[in-house]
Image: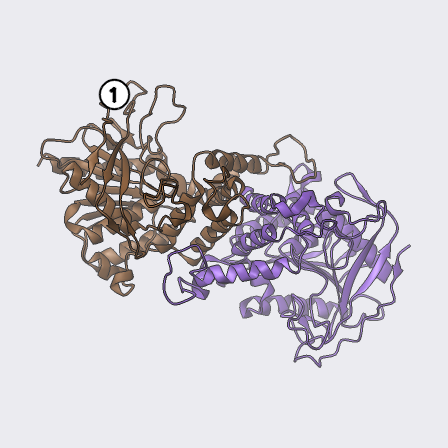
Chain colours: A brown, B purple
Amino acid sequence: MPNLDTNTALPATPQDSPGSVGIVVPQTVHFDTPLPLLCGKTLPEYDLIYETYGELNPNKSNAILVCHALSGNHHAAGRHAADDKRAGWWDACIGPGKVIDTNQFHIVSINNIGGCHGSTGPKSNNPDTGKPYGPDFPIVTAKDWVETQVRLADVLGIDQWAAVIGGSLGGMQALQWSIDHPERLRHAVVIAAAPVLSAQNIAFNEIARKAILSDPEFHGGHYYEKQSFPKTGLILARMLGHITYLSDEAMRDKFGRELREGKLKFDYNVEFQVESYLNYQGVQFSENFDANSYLLMTRALDYFDPAADYNSDLSAAVARAQCRFMLMSFTTDWRFAPARSQEIVDALIQAGKNVSYAEIDCPQGHDSFLLDIPQYTDLFRAYMDGIAQELSQ
Amino acid sequence: MPNLDTNTALPATPQDSPGSVGIVVPQTVHFDTPLPLLCGKTLPEYDLIYETYGELNPNKSNAILVCHALSGNHHAAGRHAADDKRAGWWDACIGPGKVIDTNQFHIVSINNIGGCHGSTGPKSNNPDTGKPYGPDFPIVTAKDWVETQVRLADVLGIDQWAAVIGGSLGGMQALQWSIDHPERLRHAVVIAAAPVLSAQNIAFNEIARKAILSDPEFHGGHYYEKQSFPKTGLILARMLGHITYLSDEAMRDKFGRELREGKLKFDYNVEFQVESYLNYQGVQFSENFDANSYLLMTRALDYFDPAADYNSDLSAAVARAQCRFMLMSFTTDWRFAPARSQEIVDALIQAGKNVSYAEIDCPQGHDSFLLDIPQYTDLFRAYMDGIAQELSQ
């Protein structure tokens, strides 16, 4: 039986900045019912950490599940303390009056298992050994995450989500929800996603993993006990990932060939601003993310394949869906290009589903889904307004 | 004064396979006139290794210089021994009856300084210390390479190349030739190149370098003396480079999501064919290339900027050119996309130069320039035929 821990969410207060949910406090639920996983292993017990924003209405019909992408977590909006330098990762879109409006919806944002920000993952203690799981933590997938999210919904008494929403790997979870638990969501909002990774996507992930696995500080994943950390490998992995999050155009606009110190030095230290930026991003990330979790998240992407049980026929897979769909993609996203969203749209149409699709013309690349880009948020807001209107009908 | 060493080229014989130049023997020239470099340092002396294919005509008007790309070398065509498994890197295009026809032209193919296949580079002995240069080898650029190639032309008695030809970084050298020594070439063939690297291009190079520089076996570049080699870093660097040489489409066609062993194993070992392929490519490369040279070649790319002395105005730079230009790009090349070739074409047109340009529609990506793709080689051959016809006029 799951147990809610003693943390309780403070009411969302807009004291932080206009449109902010204010200070938020995460909550944790412990699940002691074993979770069978796609990989064949079973997780005997686990914690899920999550945050909520906005009030749940009396009939519990206004709940929205936000699923995070590769490096995200449960902290999607607001701040944990008044002096936090950064707000949650989707603060641009979640808050009172924002696209996902906390005046209308009760938003649940979860940290997936396998992560490193509070839900059970590789750095958590393995109950069998009393030591961190490390490489013994089983590889989990989007399908497994959906099952944990179903269990959380059960604990929260949410029979049906008004919507399941996510960008990138988050969008993939929304798609998986629509197939695996069709009766438990009314809308799926799938942003900047793909029906399955391409060979190029997998190739990038493989190099990122290899950078971590080959770092001498990795110690086969058992670095926790060695007071060690594969920082260099994780920095490399993140730098590589980061290139794929930005468009060529966005990088050119932001950095061009600008030099860091005004003139060339002709060495292998940082010469160009883009090198400095990427290095900074890599270092920052390495201080806030666990290398074993990064390995796991990239594999979860590789393994995402909602049509696998349907003879690789996505239209057969989504034939099960009962919800309405909203898909969005971004013209300059070369990680999951619009053509990949179009593949999902085509499958949905073939299966006779109700789907809206917008390809947003903007220069920011894959990361667009995180940003307040009017062409994007206007459409997103219109769709969310439609969901809100259904609540009052 | 340069000295030709005792190696002499065997006559090209088509005994290997139809269209092959047969067995070739590299030659080396030693230069003892110091070479001032763009970086401000001077290389006191150096060797250049090169190969030739086809006969030089009596008035020496049919000589073609082939410049290599990042990981290329002087061995562009034929084989060094009858049992060589692989022919030179551009054997698809160089040979009797081929696009660059050895029945018509005398082709000179050089290994650039800074490389690791015979010309002086980081693994060569520093005459000041008697030990390998390692990280003390100065960073050379395309502009410096052109100067070494001019000196070689002088030694060979070639006053004017019929054409200077190259793909990728090789094409950049051809462009640099047209600006720095306009009277010494009649044609420049610039394939799959760019006028300057984009921020994204530099970002990829930076990650590749960081993988090498952070490998514990790198020892600050002094690994030769330690009987060590940053193999892991170089493998990572090459795997990353390799992704950018292939189009997403080509990778999808070649590998898709095919599994290596037929079923998922759910671990971090190789699962997908594309992982296996990339790892293999990385390992092969690491056994045939020097890590310090790889660092240097990527920096040569970063620093390539033929408009630098012309207030960043490429049309002002190419205004000096006297040759005709042929540019080719490939629709699915995302490393140096057609738009980058178009920038060069625009500058040439603005400067009133004679330029032909073809954007080839093919799925293979950046590496297309190395391949025998009919849409490409037919156009390339037609242009080369025009050059051959000029010889008889």
Quadrant assignment, res B19: bottom right
Give the letter of the chain under mark 1: A
Which amino acid, by three-letter code, is at mark 1? Answer: Thr
Quadrant assignment, res A384: top left
Residue in front for this viewpoint, A56 or B347: A56
Q: Which image quadrant: the C terminus of chain A?
A: top left
Q: Residue at x 52, y 48 (%)?
A: A211
Would you say B322 lies left or right of A283 here?
Answer: right
- Location of residue A158 in the rendering, given as x and y in whole percent from the top left corner: 15, 39
- Circle count: 1
Of helix, strand and loop, which one carries label 1? loop
Is any atom of residue A188 visible in this view?
yes
Which residue matches tag 1?
A: A13
Residue lying at the far front of the rendered structure: A129
- Location of residue B332 in the rendering, given as x and y in whole percent from the top left corner: 49, 58
Q: Residue at x 69, y 76 (%)?
A: B96
- Location of residue B78 in the rendering, given as x and y in whole percent from the top left corner: 70, 72
Q: Is residue B339 shown above or below B66?
A: above
Few, some or many residues within 10 Å of mark 1 (<14, 14–19, 20+): some
Quadrant assignment, res A4: top left
Q: Which image quadrant: the N terminus of chain A?
A: top left
Residue in front for this viewpoint, A195 or A144: A144
Is any atom of residue A358 visible in this view?
no
Would you say B77 lies left or right of B237 here?
Answer: right
Residue in front for this viewpoint, A375 or A324: A324
- Location of residue B353 in the rendering, given as x and y in whole percent from the top left corner: 67, 52
